[in-house]
Image (cartoon, grey):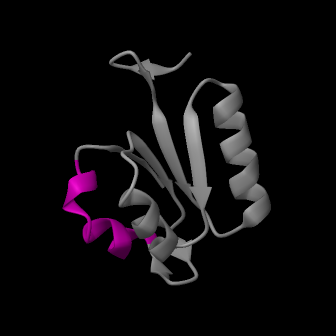
Amino acid sequence: MNESNGHPVRVLIVEDEPDLCEAMVSYLNLEGFLADGVGSASAADAWLKTHDVDIVVLDIGLPDGDGISWLNQLPALQDKGIVM
């Protein structure tokens, strides 16, 4: 199991292509991560209000903005792993 401090590593996938998002979430969960996926920056904002995250896999081109601008607005994610 992929763990951090004895807990599964929590991954948020921010990807607007549903099939790709679902495939990444399924694969990471099978590999022992605790993964969830959302399809937009606004959905990611809502998810982050109720969840903590260790790693964000971020699409740069999202339907409601670009991933880099979204990331720059969230200083709380600066100490998290980011994959773009």
* Nearer to me, 64 or 5: 5
* Nearer to me, 58 or 49: 49
Residue 27 falls in which quadrant of the image? Answer: top right
Find the magenta span and give its range.
67-78
Q: Residue at x 47, y 72 (%)?
A: 41
Q: Residue at x 67, y 45 (%)?
A: 25
Identity of the residue furthest to the right in this view:
19
Question: Does the stretch in magenta take in 74?
Answer: yes
Q: Where does the image place residue 45, in percent across and percent down from the top left?
A: 40, 68
Q: Residue at x 22, y 55 (%)?
A: 76
User: Which quarter of the rendering shows the N terminus?
Assistant: top right
Question: Does the stretch in magenta take in 79?
Answer: no
In the picture shown, does residue 80 fall above or below 50?
Answer: above
Q: Where does the image place residue 46, in percent across and percent down from the top left?
A: 43, 68
Identity of the residue furthest to the bottom in this view:
64
Q: Residue at x 26, y 64 (%)?
A: 74
Q: Main secondary structure of the magenta part?
A: helix
Q: Where does the image place residue 64, in percent across and percent down from the top left?
A: 51, 84
